[in-house]
Image (cartoon, grey):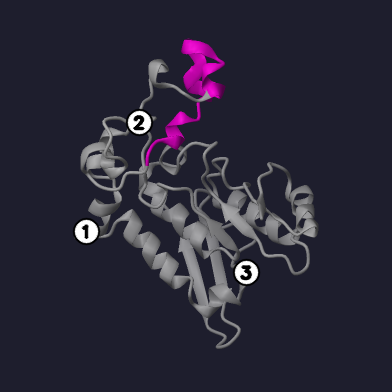
Amino acid sequence: MVVETYSAPNERNKIYKTGANPFNFDLTGGTSTGYRIRDKVLSEYVNLPTGAWPNFVIGNHDVARLTVKYGPQHVGIYNMLLLTLWGTPTCYYGDEIGLEPPTITWEQTVDPWGLNYGPTRYSEFSRDPQRTPMQWDSSSQAGFTTGNSTWLPIDPSYNRINVKTEQESAGQSNIKLYKQLAALRKNKAFQLGSFKPSARGRTRLPDLCIILAGRRIDPMTSHQLVVLMDPT
């Protein structure tokens, strides 16, 4: 069983004692520098009870899409971060293809939280943009339904940002990278190995680096996998 709670690691991780697993939402808030991400990741590990297994979440139904928080050009980088950290990754649907939210009018708004703020401020609080239908292909309604309409509107980009188009593209795509990373996680270094940041200091590394460096060590062969992510 997983438990949804927004709290500091030292409080959140007490839930492990009940037999449940608390979602770790520390990376959902739009943290954009390598140093801050490193600190949040290490905080999770430091506060983890003995024998507990960590988990990481970057997107969910309450926070802006990856494409909004970090830009569509960085979707692959954050998916790489999520799928290479030590622990269970939880991917929010659509993030594997870089789904972009549509502009939702007041008349289309259904989220009670947004509706509570009225037509002038609803867009500041509505969570509808990150809850739009999954885009499966470029057919009518993005392949989500055979009906004439959907609960929330679909972004016009569905013609190019959808599972089928990305899977069949000649070059690299967000979903292809995601599948490659999922296959990479079968490596023993990800199942049994340890995670160590390669740099702890704040010198000689770009502040905009998404994650400084991570070394995943395979205890069976002593092989090391080094993950470097830098959008600059």
Amino acid, disc 3: Lys
Residue that label 1 marks: 168
Residue that label 2 marks: 102
Q: Picture coordinates of residue 25 (x, y %)?
A: 62, 47
Residue 177 lies in the magenta-colored region: no
Residue positioned 72% across, 65% down in the render? 52
Of mark 3 and mark 2, the one earlier in the sequence is: 2
Quarter that holds the N terminus: bottom right
Identify the disc placed on residue 196: 3
Residue positioned 55% across, 36% down in the render? 62
In this picture, residue 178 sits left or right of residue 50: left
Whole-Å distance between the Cαs marked 2 and 1? 24 Å
Q: Residue furthest front?
A: 147
Q: Nearer the viewer, residue 23 or 34?
A: 23
Whole-Å distance between the Cαs marked 1 and 3? 36 Å
Amino acid, disc 1: Glu
The 10 Å Cα crowd at callout 1, few under 14, some 14 to 19, many 20 or more, is few
In the rendered view, would you say 212 is above or below 3?
below
- Residue 78, can we see it? yes
Magenta range = 112-133
Amino acid, disc 2: Pro
- Residue 232, can we see it? no
Q: Residue furthest bottom?
A: 221
Residue 126 lies in the magenta-colored region: yes
Of mark 1 and mark 3, the one earlier in the sequence is: 1
